[in-house]
Image (tube, rainbow, N blue to C red):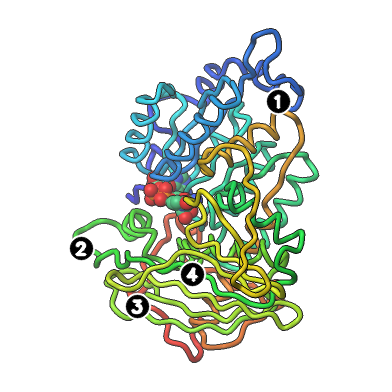
């Protein structure tokens, strides 16, 4: 029997749903604080916030840790009352890591299977962290909003145009319900980035006329499938090598730089032309590099490049040329002092630094927790959906060899197969281990 459909689906340890709800004490206390506590610490009592984690891998566990750090900053009593994953080893490892940090999650609140996320949505958690591979994000985000949860969701948030538009729709529903949504594009919460973004929006270099963005680093193949591991399990354990699960690395990694591009230009591209190739990686079906010309309104062009090949020149950063100067964001996170170039490019304008937590992974959770406690929702769903859409647009252009427009992306019914639903239904067949060749394939 396919493990996806075995009797453990939806639960990790022997227990009934009734018991799950029975042990979910304290809900009223947590809920009472949410949105009702302009003062975070009334009468010496810490506000209580409950968090559920869906996708207990490296980043999910890391995000849980970051959330805990943020709770310390804000003096919040943070509890984890639900964990969900498809693999027991992943969930147990994550649970052990959290345990080592003093976060104890009872066995009765750990759930296994493709529908395990529903148990977390049905719990009394106030916030859910969505950290599975991105192909599941539209479905999980929709369920989170329907269950009235505040959300931290990792980037990227979809792998195809239909998924991006689903995120936009759920984002609008979240806004109506006054729910906070923060995405894992941490540069938007990074103090130096925010300081420069503010200066740029105030006109320090004038209108941005062009630029380049990079995400070039090592990494690469996942290796060829061996042994008797089922297709679905191989693909999920090696999701970073499959376009259908990751969106390819222009989406999975480079979305960070694409997000900065959209942020600094205050818009999204109207079209793009892209090329790329699979030069040397083994396994999976992704490219090794992409080079993309993004066109914005008013004829502004940004050149984007991303590469996953070890032993080459590496750069992760963003560079923009404005009417009156340049902005180079490369290495900005670690910078103690930073400048933008003035009109003659020799003079430099110093940017005032912002105060706050230097760790942007913590800061994004500080911002989320604060918004939840104060009842002042922040909502990054549309931004991250647009950045993910722009990245997917670049991928589709490279795979097909065609120019792709934003309008096409907003009406396309293209979905990646196998989809999140196929994994849930147990009907996954591994795609061929080669990447598309431009000139007609999608
Ligand atoms: N913001 C950042 O800097 C950053 C860094 C790393 C990863 N990420 C993002 O975080 C996400 C997760 O990446 P990761 O590195 O943690 O991967 P990972 O493989 O370590 O973890 C993913 C986990 O999700 C589980 N999973 C898969 N499908 C599931 C489902 N349907 N329901 C429940 N659990 C499921 C897997 O078993 C695994 O434990 C990705 O979207 C990735 O792009 C962001």
Is label 2 in a helix, a strand or a loop?
loop
Image depth: mark 2 or mark 1 in front: 1
Is disc 1's CB within 8 Å of ligand 1?
A: no
x, y percent for residue 152:
59, 42
Counting residues from the N terminus, which is met first, the one under dot 3 or under dot 4? Answer: 4
Residue found farthest to the right:
176
Q: Quadrant of residue 370?
A: top right
Is label 4 in a helix, a strand or a loop?
strand
Residue found farthest to the left:
227
Counting residues from the N terminus, which is met first, the one under dot 3 or under dot 1? Answer: 1
Image depth: mark 1 or mark 4 in front: 4
Q: Is residue 5 visible?
A: no
Mark 2, Cα crowd under 10 Å, few <14 / some 14-19 / many 20+, is few
Residues at circles 1 and 4 in contact by the CB criterion of under 8 Å = no
- Above or below, 172 against 14 in this view is below
- Above or below, 27 against 211 in this view is above
Q: Residue at 46% x, 77% y: name it.
A: 290
Residues at circles 2 and 4 in contact by the CB criterion of under 8 Å = no
Counting residues from the N terminus, which is met first, the one under dot 1 or under dot 4? Answer: 1
Is disc 2's CB within 8 Å of ligand 1?
A: no
- Above or below, 441 against 33 in this view is below
Question: Label 1: which residue?
Answer: 34
Mark 1, Cα crowd under 10 Å, few <14 / some 14-19 / many 20+, is many
Question: Label 2: which residue?
Answer: 226
Image depth: mark 2 or mark 3 in front: 3
Residue 155 numbered tag: none
């Amino acid at each position: 029997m396919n493990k996806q459909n075995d009797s453990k689906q939806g639960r990790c340890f022997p227990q009934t749903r009734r018991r799950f709800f029975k042990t979910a004490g304290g809900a009223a206390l947590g809920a009472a604080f949410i949105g009702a506590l302009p003062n975070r610490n009334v009468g010496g009592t810490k506000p209580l916030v409950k968090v559920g984690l869906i996708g207990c891998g490296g980043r999910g566990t890391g995000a849980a840790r970051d959330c805990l750090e943020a709770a310390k900053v804000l003096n919040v009593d943070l509890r984890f009352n639900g964990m969900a994953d498809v693999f027991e080893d992943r969930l147990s490892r994550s649970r052990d890591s959290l345990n080592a940090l003093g976060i104890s999650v009872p066995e009765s609140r750990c759930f296994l299977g493709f529908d395990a996320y529903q148990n977390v949505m049905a719990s009394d958690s106030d916030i859910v962290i969505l950290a599975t591979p991105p192909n599941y994000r539209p479905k999980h985000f929709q369920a989170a909003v329907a269950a009235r949860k505040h959300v931290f969701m990792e980037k990227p948030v979809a792998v195809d145009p239909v998924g991006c538009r689903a995120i936009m729709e759920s984002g609008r529903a979240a806004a109506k319900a006054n729910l906070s949504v923060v995405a894992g594009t941490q540069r938007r919460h990074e103090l130096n980035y925010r300081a420069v973004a503010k200066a740029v929006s105030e006109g320090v270099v004038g209108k941005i006329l062009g630029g380049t963005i990079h995400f070039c680093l090592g990494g690469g193949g996942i290796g060829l499938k061996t042994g008797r591991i089922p297709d679905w399990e191989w693909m999920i354990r090696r999701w970073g090598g499959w376009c259908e699960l990751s969106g390819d690395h222009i989406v999975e990694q480079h979305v960070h730089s694409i997000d900065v591009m959209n942020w600094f230009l205050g818009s999204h591209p109207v079209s793009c032309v892209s090329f790329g190739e699979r030069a040397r990686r083994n396994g999976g079906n992704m490219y090794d590099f992409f080079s993309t010309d993004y066109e914005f309104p008013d004829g502004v062009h940004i050149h984007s490049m991303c590469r996953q090949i070890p032993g080459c020149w590496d750069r992760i950063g963003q560079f923009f040329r404005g009417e009156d100067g340049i902005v180079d964001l490369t290495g900005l996170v670690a910078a103690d002092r930073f400048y933008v170039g003035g009109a003659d490019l020799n003079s430099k304008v110093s940017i005032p630094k912002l105060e706050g937590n230097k760790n942007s992974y913590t800061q994004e959770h500080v911002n989320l927790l604060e918004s939840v406690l104060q009842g002042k929702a922040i909502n990054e769903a549309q931004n991250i959906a647009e950045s993910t859409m722009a990245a997917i647009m670049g991928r589709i252009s490279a795979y097909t060899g065609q120019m792709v427009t934003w309008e096409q992306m907003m009406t396309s019914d293209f979905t990646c197969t196998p989809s999140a639903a196929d994994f849930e239904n147990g009907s996954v067949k591994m795609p061929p281990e080669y990447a598309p060749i431009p000139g007609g394939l999608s």
